[in-house]
Amino acid sequence: MFTRFIFGIVVAGLAFSTASAQEADADQRKVSVVFDRALPNAPGMSMKGVLVEYGPGAASPAHTHPASAFIYATVLEGAVRIKVNDEPEKIYRAGENFVEMPGDHHGVSANASDTEPSRLLAVFVVKTDETKLVTEDK
């Protein structure tokens, strides 16, 4: 009887730990618009800066961006794993950059480290009225 009681506590503790870890993973990714400015020489278009911060091991779901979006991204800290369209997955380190063309599919966007954080700045040139910059795959 005592053994079953202890086993029940351990199982409940593991379930709680797993749920807490999953919640922590969701908290390990932060996306913030840090710049939003209409382009005076391109009516109807804006430049939007998006800071993406990943905790150790964190990732974004596969996604696309608006059809009008051209994106230039620079890794500011750490390293990120990126896969766009059918290109091979690649690791970009601090100071390196990549682009996404309108209509590209971003299959992988993740921190390349399980122990260190990473940050990247994605600069979008996109239609001014676009408010949803990311559409996750279904």
Image: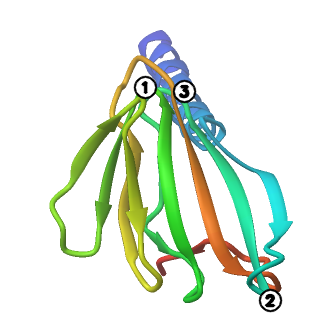
Say few, some or many: other residues with alpha carbon within 10 Å of mark 1 (under 14 / 14 to 19 / 20 or more). Answer: some
Q: Which residue is mark 2?
A: 44
Q: Secondary structure at mark 1?
A: loop
- 12 or 105, nearer to the observer: 105
**Could you say which quadrant of the image residue 108 lies in?**
bottom left
Residue 96 at what x, y percent from top left?
Answer: 37, 39
Instruction: Say if mark 1 contacts mark 3, CB within 8 Å.
Output: no
State the mark number for residue 17. Answer: 3
> Against 83, is 24 above or below?
above
> Against 69, is 47 above or below?
above
Direction from residue 15 to residue 3 in the image, left or right:
left
State the mark number for residue 49. Answer: none
Q: Which residue is mark 1?
A: 78
Callout 3 amino acid: Ser
- Of labels 3 and 2, earlier in sequence is 3
- 124 or 58, nearer to the observer: 124
Instruction: Say if mark 2 contacts mark 1, CB within 8 Å.
Output: no
- CA distance separating discs 1 and 3: 27 Å
Callout 2 amino acid: Gly
- 16 or 120, nearer to the observer: 120
- CA distance separating discs 2 and 1: 35 Å
Number of numbered labels in the structure image: 3
